[in-house]
Image: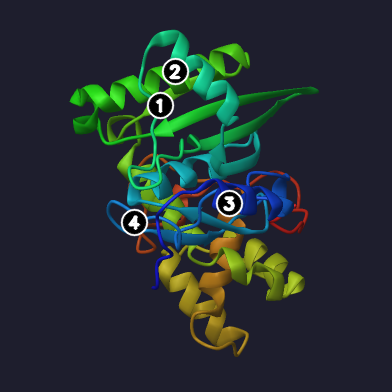
């Protein structure tokens, strides 16, 4: 993938602002940085969001893993990645704390700070916001990184937004693996037949086979292309119409007994809202 030039200038920053980067919400939000704009540590990812119905730009595996946790959390209603901070405010904080503000070493242009995730939460009727920075734990021993974190922390403190650092130590690997497996079919849900979803849901409730056996049997019984039932199954899990222990390793060779079913028939609502 071709990367754009990384040099920052005032004209480039003005162009990004004119493009609407760092503005909007949900499907209309544009991240300040995309995977084409910066070199990433590890693998970069473009993932279609369940909650936002847009492509998210995640600059590392660690960011992707945290994103999966946000996608699964019921209280999270919007996820804005690579969120820009007001540069005038970060410059003032830098001066007040006598910490050197990051600059482009070639152009000497002060760089726009970004926070990895700006998250909207809804608890009942209350809307709140949190900001999270994602960093490998071994980076926390770097004095310069800690200095920049202090500017970021002070910024969000002044904005009265809860800010924190998340490392790989706070991200449960089994949970992430399970959500990632479900997310791999997240974009296919629009094309699924609602009647088939309902039929498979009821079939599972009376089935005594393993999950994998139920998938093969349903495909054969309904004369479906191989793998169709798996898409239905992932949809039911991803929309939480069927529940399972997200924190423990999951395998389709497991017994159907590892699944829980709601009392009422699932309301087939699209994942992306």
Q: Tag 1, which secondary structure?
A: loop
Residue 105: percent from the left, percent from the top?
33, 42
Residue 33: percent from the left, percent from the top?
51, 51
**Above or below, 104 relative to 95:** below
Q: Residues within 10 Å of mark 4 (few under 14, many from 20)?
A: some
Residues under numbered marks 4 and 3 in contact, where contact means CB atoms less than 8 Å apart: no
Marks 1 and 3: which is nearer the front?
3
Among numbered discs 1 and 4, the one appearing first in the sequence: 4
Give the CA separation, mark 1 to mark 3. 19 Å
Among numbered discs 4 and 2, the one appearing first in the sequence: 4
Q: Residues within 10 Å of mark 3 (few under 14, many from 20)?
A: few
Give the CA separation, mark 1 to mark 4. 20 Å
Total label count?
4
**Above or below, 164 relative to 182:** above
Locate the N terminus and report the quarter of the image it occupies.
bottom left
Kindly identify the residue that appears in the image at 66 percent across and 32 percent down: 120
Res 39 label? 4
Res 94 label? 2
């Amino acid at each position: 993938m071709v990367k754009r030039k990384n040099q920052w200038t005032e004209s480039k920053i003005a162009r990004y602002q004119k493009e609407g980067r760092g503005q909007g919400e949900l499907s209309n939000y544009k991240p300040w940085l995309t995977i084409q704009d910066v070199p990433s540590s590890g693998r970069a990812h473009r993932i279609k969001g369940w909650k936002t119905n847009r492509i998210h730009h995640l600059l590392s595996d660690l960011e992707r893993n945290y994103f999966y946790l946000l996608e699964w959390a019921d209280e999270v209603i919007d996820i804005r990645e690579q969120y820009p901070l007001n540069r005038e405010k970060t410059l003032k904080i830098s001066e007040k704390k006598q910490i050197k503000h990051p600059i482009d070493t070639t152009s000497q242009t002060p760089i726009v700070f970004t926070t990895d995730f700006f998250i909207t939460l809804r608890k009942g009727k209350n809307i709140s916001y949190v900001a999270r920075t994602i960093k490998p734990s071994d980076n926390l021993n770097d004095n310069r990184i800690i200095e920049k974190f202090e500017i970021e922390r002070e910024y969000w403190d002044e904005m009265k937004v809860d800010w924190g650092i998340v490392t790989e130590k706070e991200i449960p690997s089994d949970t992430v693996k399970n959500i990632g497996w479900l997310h791999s079919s997240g974009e296919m849900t629009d094309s699924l037949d609602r009647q088939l979803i309902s039929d498979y849901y009821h079939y599972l409730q009376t089935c005594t086979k393993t999950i994998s056996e139920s998938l093969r049997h349903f495909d054969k019984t309904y004369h479906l292309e191989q793998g169709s039932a798996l898409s239905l199954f992932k949809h039911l899990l991803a929309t939480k119409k069927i529940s399972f222990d997200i924190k423990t390793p999951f395998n389709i060779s497991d017994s159907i007994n590892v699944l829980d079913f709601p009392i009422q028939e699932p309301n087939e609502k699209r994942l992306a809202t």
